[in-house]
């Protein structure tokens, strides 16, 4: 891992930029295509299914915003440690992002499950019976 990190300091910039940007580009394209494909397949179920996607979309955008903001913060911290030539701290911080991502994902999951009534009320959907099972929403 240390050799891989050290290469960031002396590899040709063009090749390094391409190599490091391709995963981000693929992730963004995949996220965009996910929404389009999801809407296409869900549309076969009816207009209520598309309405459900529309209601959940702001929550998804919030989740993406937190994930991107966290990623930018971690990237900045890793860059500073790399600039200080502290490769051990760089590797340690970069490794922590997986645990941070899992933790944030779990927090968002729990928040979504526990606050579904409030979320529906805030999104203007007041005509739902709160006794309705989740799997029929």
Image (cartoon, grey):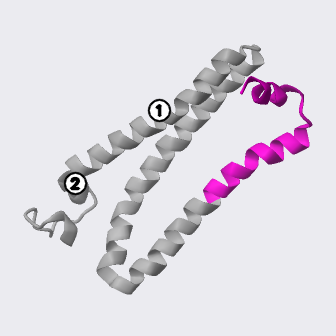
Q: Nearer the viewer, residue 105 or 112?
A: 105
Q: Which residues are magenta?
A: 1-28
Q: Which mark, by number, is residue 12?
A: none
Residue at figure coordinates x 57%, y 68% from the top left: 33
Q: Label 1, label 2: how many angstroms apart (C-alpha)?
A: 26 Å
Q: Quadrant of the C terminus?
A: bottom left
Q: Nearer the viewer, residue 3 or 89?
A: 3
Q: Nearer the viewer, mark 1 or mark 2?
A: 1
Quarter of the image for residue 74 reads: top right
- Taking 68 as reference, is 100 above or below it? above
SS of the residue under disc 2: helix
SS of the residue under disc 1: helix
Question: Disc 1 marks which residue?
Answer: 99
Q: Which mark, by number, is residue 116?
A: 2
**Left or right for 115, reference 29:** left
- Taking 60 as reference, is 1 above or below it? above
**Left or right for 85, reference 135:** right
Sequence-wise, the earlier of marks 1 and 2 is 1
Furthest-right residue in view? 12
């Amino acid at each position: 891992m240390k050799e891989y990190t050290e290469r960031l300091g002396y590899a040709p910039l063009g090749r390094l930029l391409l190599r490091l940007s391709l995963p981000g580009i693929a992730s963004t394209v995949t996220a965009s295509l996910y929404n389009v494909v999801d809407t296409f397949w869900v549309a076969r179920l009816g207009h209520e299914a598309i309405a459900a996607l529309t209601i959940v979309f702001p929550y998804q955008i919030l989740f993406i915003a937190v994930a991107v903001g966290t990623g930018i913060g971690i990237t900045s911290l890793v860059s500073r440690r790399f600039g200080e030539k502290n490769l051990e701290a760089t590797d340690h911080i970069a490794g922590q992002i997986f645990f941070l991502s899992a933790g944030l994902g779990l927090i968002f999951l729990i928040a979504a499950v526990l606050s579904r009534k409030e979320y529906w009320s805030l999104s203007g959907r007041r005509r739902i019976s709160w006794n309705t099972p989740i799997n029929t929403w």
